[in-house]
Each structure stands twice: as structure tokens, then as C-alpha cells.
């Protein structure tokens, strides 16, 4: 390959924090380097669980024979597109330090995001010349021991956690994903692409190693980077990646909050034009030099606290942010956008100590409780005690108890060493898990008329068994209140509940659901009250994605055929 030239120039500009900049506008936190290129660059990766990837700037391009092989096998890849699995409700984090290894802090950050996925975890760091990767199935603490952390060298790194989907549970499906050409790019992704089949057809001879839509996204972005490198070989590398992701956003549909590490460029993050999944920017001063900034980008700002980062702002929908190798922050609005975040984040997925899109998750849940309490009053039920179903329903249950002037009691004891049943891969596993997940205290339920409050009722697997637990513990009557409306439609943007047949509210009235769950009464939050609760906390959000409740999909490309295809292969 041709030699590569690095030219340095100083660029000064103001760090802009406006809510949404015009499309194409670029803002910087300080000076940056010009990184010109003469040709495509290649970094080589080995397919091992813990490995180092040497970035060889003198490596030649793929041979003609290899290119022909890629093209010859393209049709085989296209035939598999309907089997792609989404990277659902994952947690992602990226860190750039001025000095010292990033791996230990990535580990701490992943622990703070563990609630977003317990199936697998992965991490990759970069020391300036090599990528180092470790990923496997399991919890963060099980995968990353001290030896692994010490082996992951470099000031910059990214990490990922995910929970199970209907397939693709091998360690090779764990993120981050890697392509060695151009440059060498690692990617982590939270969300779900809704046109991955179409995208993969447009990739020509690029071969996929997994069934993940995240790998498709990585290859689409890599192709766009390569096209920019070929068309503009002397451009700044920051312009190359911004122009590339602008083209990527024009093609990709669905939800995607993404963090990449690009050889010779830096930490590069971007968010879809609807801002469906969260992504937050954090900043702190370097411990040894207060003139230097250090950066963190994560799914939730709850990951910032233990690491000493301060929340700067949400990454805007349609925005890309580059943290250069020198630690400068550069941002550009790459697509016309309208913030339409997934409201299920605030109900179930996010931690209560997180603030997403300028809305406190905890305050939102309290407001849901206040609004639901008004509806409960109209039922005129005789209730002795309010009991939350741990953990996410506590804020709403506390407000309901206060509004109804009734005692609040913790009557269900949770075994914290059992995974969340919502995200178990099949129905039988979920049912077995519930019986060892919760235990009802007889001293709370015996002889009482109880109102159980849950954050949401999705499949009903957990709730039907909890109702029976309460009766076995002596409850005279058991009423149910859901802080969320009934879930009736698939969430196609990154939450693992795509099959309508799995929903307890599917083709059932409220009374039929109540009878199915074995309760004496049932009340749901209304969709309008839920949406008004969100809008009251951020008036700039005109539309939330509440598709799992109302069937209105913000990307506008979801057909009945697409939804029917999601039914295939789901665990029942």
C-alpha cells in the first residue's frame, strides 16, 4: 500500500452545547490534528477471546483472489438476513483518559450498566498501536478478573453488556465487533436496526461472522468510511468519519446508539435521528493535568458517578461526537432529527438514578404513581396495604400509598442472585425462575386486602405466580396496579419482547387479563397519562416512542409483514 502522511495543524473553535446544531455544523472542544491519508488502512484481528490486534499501516490491501471470494459468497450471506438477531436493551460505555489504563474504569462502568444485560459482556482497549479485546458470556464480574483487566492496556476503550435474545447466544455474538478494513474499527451498539436485511444486501462481498444486526451496522459504517477515504484521500480523518456517518444515517433505519473506536481517529459515537435509545456525554479533568479533559460516553449517566465524571449533556439525536486521540471533543449534527425517545426506558430499563433526555427516571416513576393513584380512587376498592413488586415499581408504589393515605409495606423479598424473568429466553425458564426469585412475607399479607403495584405487566409470567404467592401467604384479596399501560405491540427498537402472542394483554380485555392473572381487580396506567408525565418533564419532546403500548412506530417503516417475521423462532 502507499505510505501514509500525517500533517499537523491547529484548529481552534468554541465548545458548543446548543441542544441541536444545524445539520453539518461541527463544534470542537479545542485544537485538533490533521490526519491525512493516502489509501485505505488495515488493522489485523485474531479471533480469540483475549487478543491484541496490531495496527499495521504498511499492510497491503486484500488480494484480488480474496475479493473474488467475497463476491462469490455474497448470495449465501443474503440468504441468511431474515435470521439476524437484534442487540437488545444493551448497555454501552466508552472512556478516554489522559493517562493510565481505561480498563479498570470500563469495568466499573459496566457494573453500573449490568442491569441492561446479564447474558454477555465485552471490552476492548487501544494503546496507540494495538487493540486488546476480551469478551464472553456471563456477568461482568465473572468475565473480567484482575488478570484480564491488567492485560487490557491503553488510555481509550469501550465496553458492552447485553441480555439474551431468541438465538445467537455464543460468545462470538458478544460485542464489541471488529472489522480490520479500513483502518481497523471496533463497534458497540444498543438498539435494533429495522432494515438490516436491505443493508446487508448492499454490502457486496463483505462477510458476516455472526447473526447480529450490530455487525451489519459496523460493516455499513466501515464501507462508508472506506468510500470517503478513496474519494478524499487527503482529508482530515475527523472529516472522513463525520462524512461517513452522515451517509450511514441516511441508510440505516431503526434505533442505534453507537460507540466505536477507530484506529488513527479516536473514540467516535453517534445516535439515531430519533434518539430512541439513550446516550450521554460525561467529562472530568485529568488528575495530573487540569488543562486536560477526559471523557466518558455511556447509555446512562448513572455510570458517571463512581468514575468521577460529570454529566455534560445527552448526545443529540442525529449527532456524532469524536473524542480525538489527543482528547479533544468534536461534534457534528449529521442528520435532521426529532427527539422521540423510547418511553419504556423510563418505566423498566433504566436505573432510577439516571437522567435521560433531561428527564429524571425516578421523578418520572413518581409521577406515574401520582397519576395512577387518581385512577385507583375511582375504583373504590377496599385496600389495607400497598405492596410493590421489587424493584422498579417502588417509586410509583410509594406515591400511590401517599395519595391513597394507605400504609406502604415491603411484602415481597427478592433473591438478588436470580436474573430478570422478563429477559429469560423461553417461557419455561421464566416460570422456574419466578418461583425462586420472590418470597411473600406472611406477616404483611395475612388477613389483608392488598394492592400489588408493578412497573409493567408484559408476559404475566411473574405476576400470576406472585398473586398466588400472596394468597398462600394469607391475603384475603389481591388487587393489581400497573404503572404502565398494557403492552400489546412488539417493541422493535431494542427490547426483547417482539412476539405479540407472548403478551398477557394480547387480544384480552382488562377483565380477561385480571381473570387470567387470578387477581380480584386490575388497573393499568392510561397511555395518555403516561405520555403527559413525560412531556411535563421535558416540553421539547413532542413525541415519545410508545409503540409497545399504542402500536405507533416512530421510524415509520414497520409493516405487518415485518412484525409477523419477528414471531418466528420466539420462545413461548
Image (cartoon, helix red, strand yellow):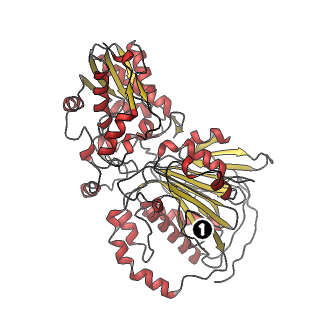
Residue lying at 58% horizontally and 70% vertically, measured from the top left: 45
x and y percentages locating residue 214 in the rendered image: 45, 60
Label 1 sits on residue = 240
Name the residue nearer the viewer: 433 or 338.
433
The part of the image, by quadrant, that contains residue 282 is: top right
Residue at x 27% of width, y 44% of height: 502
Residue 399 visible: yes
Give residue 68's quadrant in the image. Answer: bottom left
Q: Quadrant of residue 382?
A: top left
Q: Position of residue 331 (x, y in %)?
A: 61, 55
Looking at the image, which is closer to me, 349 or 335?
Answer: 349
> Residue drawn 57% across and 82% down?
61
Q: Is residue 31 above or below residue 412?
A: below
Of 34 and 397, which appears nearest the observer?
397
Q: Is residue 385 left or right of residue 220?
A: left
Residue 343 visible? The answer is no
The vertical placement of 143 against 405, above or below, is: below
| In the rendered image, the vertical position of residue 405 relative to residue 434, given as above or below | above
- In the picture, measured across the screen, residue 151 lies left or right of residue 113, that is right
**Where residue 195 sits: x, y (%)?**
37, 61
Q: Can you say which quadrant of the picture contains the N terminus?
A: bottom right
Amino acid at each position: 500500500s502507499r505510505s501514509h502522511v500525517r500533517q499537523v495543524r491547529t484548529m481552534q473553535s468554541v465548545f458548543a452545547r446548543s441542544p441541536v446544531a444545524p445539520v453539518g455544523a461541527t463544534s470542537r472542544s479545542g485544537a485538533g490534528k490533521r490526519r491525512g491519508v493516502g489509501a485505505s488502512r488495515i488493522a489485523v484481528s485474531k479471533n480469540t477471546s483475549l487478543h491484541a490486534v496490531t495496527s499495521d499501516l504498511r499492510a497491503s490491501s486484500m488480494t484480488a483472489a480474496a475479493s473474488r471470494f467475497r463476491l462469490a459468497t455474497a448470495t449465501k450471506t443474503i440468504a441468511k438476513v431474515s435470521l439476524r438477531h437484534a442487540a437488545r436493551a444493551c448497555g454501552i460505555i466508552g472512556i478516554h483518559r489522559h493517562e493510565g489504563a481505561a480498563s479498570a474504569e470500563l469495568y466499573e462502568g459496566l457494573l453500573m450498566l449490568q442491569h441492561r444485560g446479564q447474558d454477555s459482556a465485552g471490552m476492548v482497549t487501544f494503546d496507540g498501536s494495538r487493540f486488546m479485546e476480551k469478551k464472553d458470556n456471563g456477568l461482568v464480574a465473572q468475565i473480567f478478573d484482575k488478570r484480564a483487566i491488567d492485560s487490557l492496556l491503553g488510555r481509550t476503550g469501550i465496553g458492552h453488556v447485553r441480555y439474551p435474545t431468541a438465538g445467537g447466544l455464543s460468545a462470538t455474538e458478544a460485542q464489541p465487533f471488529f472489522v480490520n478494513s479500513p483502518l481497523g474499527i471496533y463497534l458497540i451498539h444498543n438498539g435494533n436496526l429495522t432494515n438490516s436485511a436491505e443493508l446487508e444486501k448492499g454490502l457486496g462481498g463483505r462477510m458476516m461472522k455472526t447473526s447480529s444486526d450490530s455487525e451489519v451496522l459496523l460493516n455499513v459504517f466501515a464501507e462508508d468510511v472506506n468510500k470517503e477515504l478513496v474519494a478524499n484521500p487527503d482529508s482530515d480523518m475527523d472529516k472522513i468519519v463525520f462524512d461517513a456517518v452522515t451517509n450511514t444515517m441516511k441508510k440505516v433505519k431503526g434505533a442505534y446508539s453507537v460507540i466505536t473506536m477507530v484506529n488513527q481517529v479516536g473514540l467516535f459515537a453517534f445516535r439515531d435521528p430519533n434518539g430512541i435509545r439513550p446516550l450521554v456525554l460525561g467529562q472530568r479533568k485529568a488528575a495530573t493535568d487540569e488543562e486536560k479533559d477526559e471523557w466518558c460516553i455511556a447509555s446512562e449517566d448513572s455510570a458517571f458517578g463512581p468514575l468521577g465524571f460529570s454529566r455534560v449533556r445527552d448526545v443529540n439525536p442525529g449527532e456524532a461526537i469524536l473524542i480525538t486521540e489527543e482528547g479533544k471533543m468534536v461534534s457534528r449534527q449529521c442528520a435532521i432529527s426529532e427527539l422521540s425517545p423510547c418511553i419504556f426506558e423510563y418505566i423498566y430499563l433504566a436505573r432510577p438514578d439516571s437522567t435521560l433526555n433531561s428527564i429524571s427516571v425516578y421523578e418520572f416513576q413518581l409521577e406515574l404513581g401520582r397519576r395512577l393513584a387518581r385512577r385507583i380512587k375511582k375504583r373504590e376498592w377496599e385496600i389495607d396495604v400497598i405492596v410493590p413488586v421489587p424493584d422498579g415499581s417502588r417509586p410509583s408504589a410509594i406515591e400511590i400509598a401517599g395519595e391513597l393515605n394507605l400504609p406502604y409495606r415491603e411484602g415481597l423479598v427478592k433473591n438478588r442472585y436470580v436474573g430478570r424473568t422478563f429477559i429469560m429466553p423461553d417461557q419455561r425458564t421464566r416460570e422456574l425462575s419466578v418461583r425462586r426469585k420472590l418470597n411473600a412475607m406472611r406477616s404483611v399479607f395475612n388477613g389483608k386486602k392488598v394492592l400489588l403495584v408493578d412497573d409493567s405487566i408484559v408476559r404475566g409470567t411473574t405476576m400470576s405466580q406472585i398473586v398466588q404467592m400472596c394468597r398462600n401467604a394469607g391475603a384475603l384479596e389481591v388487587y393489581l396496579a400497573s404503572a404502565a399501560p398494557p403492552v400489546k405491540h412488539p417493541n422493535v427498537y431494542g427490547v426483547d419482547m417482539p412476539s405479540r402472542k407472548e403478551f398477557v394483554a394480547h387480544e384480552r380485555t382488562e377483565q380477561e387479563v385480571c381473570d387470567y392473572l387470578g387477581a380480584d381487580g386490575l388497573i393499568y396506567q392510561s397511555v395518555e397519562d403516561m405520555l403527559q408525565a413525560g412531556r411535563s418533564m421535558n416540553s421539547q419532546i413532542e413525541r415519545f416512542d410508545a409503540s409497545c403500548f399504542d402500536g405507533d412506530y416512530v421510524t415509520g417503516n414497520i409493516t405487518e409483514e415485518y412484525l409477523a417475521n419477528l414471531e418466528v423462532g420466539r420462545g413461548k
